[in-house]
Image (cartoon, helix red, strand yellow):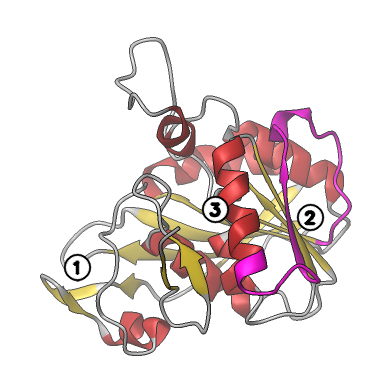
Amino acid sequence: MKTRQLHGTPYEVVVQKLHAYNLDTILLANFASTRIKKSKKIVDLGTGNGVLMLYISLYTDAHMVGYDITPDLIDIANQNIKLNHLQHQIEAIEQDVTTLTMIDCDTIITNPPYFKYDSNTNVSTHESRTIARFEISMTIDTILALSSKSLKTKQSLLMIHRSDRLDEIMIKAQHVQLTLKEVQFIHPYQDKPSEVVLLHFIKDGKQALKVLPPMILYDTKHQLSLPLKNIYKGVSNVTEYIKP
């Protein structure tokens, strides 16, 4: 088993080629860090290798449960939890999110599959990679419906997703009583369009959307912006800005 340090943390994580973590995970964890202060139980939908929960554990003592359909990823997640002695706070469960009808929690976080899927979609030969990228099992409809059923008034759903799907996500969220309260667009460069967006939904929230200042990731090629340097705490050898 090979391990490496989890960027900007005291943790070690298991390294496997197809089961890495990426920048989106770190951006979501940073975004969530100031929005989970009152959380007692956090659920991560589509937890993968559990890295998002490891990052979140730096900011909260809340109990965390991660669900994922892929056995190999849950195995890695549990290795990561044990490797960092976090069994008292974090657990990873192999379960298809679509089989959950309601979950006991006060905050939901997710870095979900970004892309729609149909019979003509060109997918990876590796099933776990395909499930991570495409809405084969867990869709945005599944996430929003489950979040609406599980969360009480004023509780939060925190998510990162593709910017070009924002209008669709907002409309669907409104139909299940989830109000978008905060949005932050992420741009690879100052002069490039936003590719992903950070979203904070509130159950039964009032209509008062706050658009946060955009985050620019790179000043030039391979040169991190100051905000991203701060997130990484000076670590610059980050994974490429792509979905795994």
> What is the C-alpha distance between the residues marked 3 and 2?
28 Å
- Mark 1 near mark 3, Cβ–Cβ under 8 Å? no
The structure residue drawn at horizontal position 28% and vertical position 87%, both measured from the top left corner, is 226
Q: In the rendered structure, which disc, 1 or 2, sits on the residue that comes first in sequence? A: 1
> Which residues, given as a range, are shown in magenta?
82-106
Q: Secondary structure of the magenta portion, mostly?
A: loop
Check the image and name the residue furthest to the left. Answer: 221
Which corner quadrant of the image does residue 86 belong to? bottom right
> What is the C-alpha distance between the residues marked 1 and 2?
33 Å
Query: Of residues 150 and 17, which is closer to you in this image?
Result: 17
Magenta run includes residue 101: yes
Query: Of residues 3 and 65, which is closer to you in this image?
Result: 3
Amino acid, disc 3: Asn
Q: In the rendered structure, which disc, 3 or 2, sits on the residue that comes first in sequence? A: 3
Amino acid, disc 1: Tyr
Q: How many numbered marks does the figure carry?
A: 3
Tell me the residue that label 1 is attached to: 189
Residue 175: percent from left, percent from top: 71, 37
Tell me the residue that label 3 is attached to: 49
Q: Which label lies toward us, 1 or 3?
A: 3
Q: SS at mark 2?
A: strand
The structure residue drawn at horizontal position 55% and vertical position 48%, both measured from the top left corner, is 48
Q: In the rendered structure, which disc, 1 or 3, sits on the residue that comes first in sequence? A: 3
Amino acid, disc 2: Lys
Tell me the residue that label 2 is attached to: 203
Q: Which label lies toward us, 1 or 2?
A: 1
Check the image and name the residue furthest to the front. Answer: 1
